[in-house]
């Protein structure tokens, strides 16, 4: 089976399995499942000087139950040929990137409030990142597990802030040299992360959504080089157009998105312009 077909099949299987897992493990008090599409022409990849166009299709599921909440997301990222699928190829790279997080709310477990100041709740989050990419130089197969405490802030919508330990490994393969690197584990490192969705109304039903990750350096990379701390901020302003098309609230959303990612995947951006991305995008979502 061609690598691209395997990648698409892997994406579909991850989505089905994770959606089933989060849907059956606990009886959900609420849930939100969505399909979305985003597009940009200024994506960047380390050691690639080009502005890369990407089409990204996403499946996401979030749900809450008696003691906490689940979040699962899988992106299928399709690059232009300036991020080639292999050495000498005229086709673009394809990537599947999955994220799962489970947050336990200590107040719900104990049956009492742990609110203080701007904090409405305290909990713990654990989960994983998993990716597979077909590209010319690296062919990432990232495996990452995270765990740590979470503060849930008292805002309209939600704003969760977590301090997570990261255990990460990768096993790259270069199509330039046809050499594989054995799976390599980085030093355990930390991530301060926030995720939010805050509604507001300026005469239109809008929301400010996104996430921000601040990740410490993870020691030496697979090839003996140093890594750098990362800043990855992805935020969007979304307009709920559901009423305009006669649909229920929060069914159809459109908006604009911007991502700033410095030292992408821990690659220092000194003399490596592709290691920092500044990417405007357009985005559309269907929630069901």
Image (cartoon, rainbow, N blue to C red):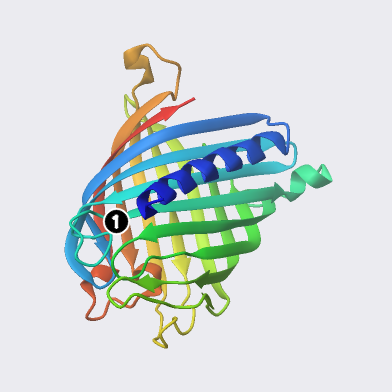
Quarter-wise, where is residue 146 in the image? Answer: bottom right
The structure residue drawn at horizontal position 45% and vertical position 20%, both measured from the top left corner, is: 249
> Furthest-bottom residue in view?
224
Q: Is residue 121 visible?
A: no
- Indicate the position of residue 226 as horizontal and vertical percent values: 40, 85
Residue shown at the point (82%, 42%) measured from the top left = 111
Q: Of all residues shown, which one is farthest toward the top?
A: 246
From the top left corner, tell me how far across and down residue 74 is, in percent.
47, 46
Q: Residue at x 45, y 16 (%)?
A: 248
Residue placed most toward the observer, 85 or 56 = 85
What is the residue that sits farthest to the front in this orientation? 1
Q: Where 218 falls versus 52 (above or below)? A: below
Specify few, some or many for label 1: CA neighbours under 10 Å numbering under 14, 14-19, or 20 or more.
Answer: many
Name the residue that disc number 1 marks. 93
x, y percent for residue 270: 26, 80
Reply above or below: 202 against 222. Answer: above
Q: Quadrant of residue 125?
A: bottom right
Provide the secondary structure element on which disc 1 rests: loop
Residue at screen point 54% across, 31% down? 32
Q: Residue furthest right?
A: 110
Is 158 rendered above or below residue 2?
A: above
Q: How many labels, in total?
A: 1
The percent coordinates of residue 170 (x first, y second) are 48, 71
């Amino acid at each position: 089976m061609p690598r691209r077909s395997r990648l698409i099949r892997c994406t579909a299987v991850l989505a089905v399995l994770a959606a089933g897992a989060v849907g059956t493990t606990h009886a959900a008090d609420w849930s939100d499942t969505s399909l979305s599409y985003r597009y940009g022409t200024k994506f960047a990849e380390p050691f690639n000087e080009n502005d890369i166009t990407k089409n990204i299709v996403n499946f996401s599921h979030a749900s809450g139950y008696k003691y906490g909440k689940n979040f699962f997301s899988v992106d299928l990222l399709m690059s232009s040929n300036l991020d080639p699928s292999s050495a000498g190829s005229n086709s673009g790279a394809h990537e599947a990137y999955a994220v799962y997080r489970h947050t336990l709310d200590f107040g719900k477990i104990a049956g009492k409030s742990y609110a203080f100041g701007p904090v409405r709740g305290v909990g713990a989050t654990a989960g994983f990142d998993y990716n597979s990419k077909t590209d010319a130089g690296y062919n990432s197969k990232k495996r990452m597990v995270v765990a740590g405490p979470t503060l849930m802030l008292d805002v309209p919508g939600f704003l969760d802030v977590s301090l997570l330990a990261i255990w990460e490994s990768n096993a790259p393969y270069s199509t330039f040299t046809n050499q594989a690197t054995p799976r390599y584990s980085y030093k355990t490192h930390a991530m301060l992360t926030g995720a939010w969705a805050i509604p507001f109304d300026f005469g239109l039903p809008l929301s400010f959504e996104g996430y921000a990750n601040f990740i410490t350096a993870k020691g030496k990379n697979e090839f003996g080089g140093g890594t750098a701390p990362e800043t990855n901020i992805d935020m969007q302003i979304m307009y709920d157009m559901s009423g305009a098309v006669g649909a229920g609230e929060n069914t159809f959303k459109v908006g604009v998105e911007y991502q700033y990612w410095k030292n992408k995947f821990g690659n220092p951006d000194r003399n490596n312009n592709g290691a920092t991305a500044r990417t405007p995008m357009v985005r559309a979502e269907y929630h069901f």
